[in-house]
Amino acid sequence: MSQTVAFVGVGRMGANMARRLKDCGYAVTAVYDVNREAASALAAELGAKDCTTLADVTAAADVIFTVVTNDAAMRSIFFGAEDNLFTGAAGKIFINCATLSPAIHREVYDAANKAGAHSLEACMASSISHAREGKLYLMLAGDQAIYDKVSAMIEQMSVNRRFIGGPGRAAEVKALVNMVMNINTAGLAEGLGLAAALGHDLGMIREVFSQTGANSRVLETDGGDMVAREHDCWFSADHAAKDSGIAAGLATEVGLNLPLNSATVAQYEKMVTLGLGGLDKSGIAELTFKGRHA
């Protein structure tokens, strides 16, 4: 546990990952976030430096995790003209955990090599509580030799993991995971919305679904919330629109038509347009139940 660790992006996932590594005995030496209040609070909690520049983050640690919102944010932290993570980055390892396009992961990987540093993808398919408990499922990509250098740390954060291949490959698989999850969520919302319009008891419908081919992980995690209209955010509609959109872009690149994904993207983008993007992805039911949003 001699490797020191820093985090860029300390929202709910990033902060809980940092807490987990601290609990496991790693020195979390620095944190950074555009949300200065969140960064300061976590820095005080963990005894880390509350960095005001990205260059200071790189200087403070051997391994730097990034958990940012989108491709633009990723490009900003690595390629900003006045301040970026590649300043003095020789020998550093960057582990990039957000769901982003494969293209930006490859761009960062190439730039890291030019800077004498290393970049890994560690795409997450788990929840906030899993991050805190070290029970993430991680999809990893980059150079196997670099992964081996941080594998002990990664194992402390995850209940299971899969090394997939070269740069961008984990991001491709994560896009597939979220594409299928979001399609399932949209399909469940339509099924429950139609059942409600037909006057069925939705508790009964959910039980029948659970015992038949309509069963899914989404039924377990989102079905009750759709009925109760409880959409506290674990995975936002904003992120669902972004991630399904990444999959749509990949399909376009290979000349493949994905009509179900296209419809799902349209539904989540409609949520964003209606001002519902901050709801959990289960909030897509607000578009399918009669008497809710049009």
Image (cartoon, rainbow, N blue to C red):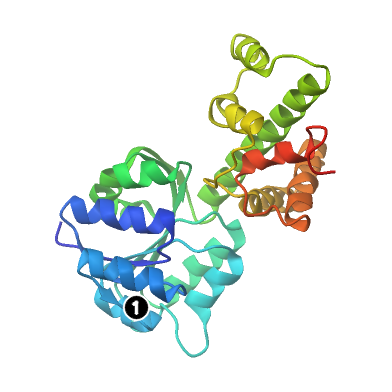
Residue 262, compared with residue 34, is above or below; it is above
Q: Quadrant of the N terminus?
A: bottom left
Viewer-proximal residue among 292 and 144: 292
> What residue is at 50 percent from the left and 64 percent from the top?
68
Q: Is residue 23 left or right of residue 285?
A: left
Q: Is residue 204 above or below residue 231?
A: above
Q: Position of residue 92 (x, y in %)?
A: 31, 71
Residue 138 drawn at (x, y percent): 42, 44
Amino acid under disc 1:
Ala
- SS type, badge 1: loop
Q: Quadrant of residue 260?
A: top right
**Looking at this view, is 187 or 204 the one in front?**
204
Mark 1, Cα crowd under 10 Å, few <14 / some 14-19 / many 20+, is: many
Does residue 216 appear anywhere in the picture? Answer: yes
Residue that badge 1 annotates: 89
**Where, by quadrant of the figure, is residue 49 drawn?**
bottom left
Quarter in which the C terminus is drawn: top right
Residue shown at 78%/32% (left/top)?
Answer: 289
Q: Is residue 40 left or right of residue 3?
A: right
How many marks are shown on the rendered structure?
Answer: 1
Q: Work out whether 293 lies above or below 274.
A: above
The answer to whether residue 252 shows anywhere in this view is no
Q: Position of residue 12 (x, y in %)?
A: 42, 55
Which residue appears at 30% of the width and 58% of the height? 18
Percent across and percent down for residue 167 are: 50, 56
Task: Answer left or right for 23 relative to 80.
Answer: left
Q: Is residue 236 left or right of residue 115?
A: right
The outermost residue toward the bottom is 82
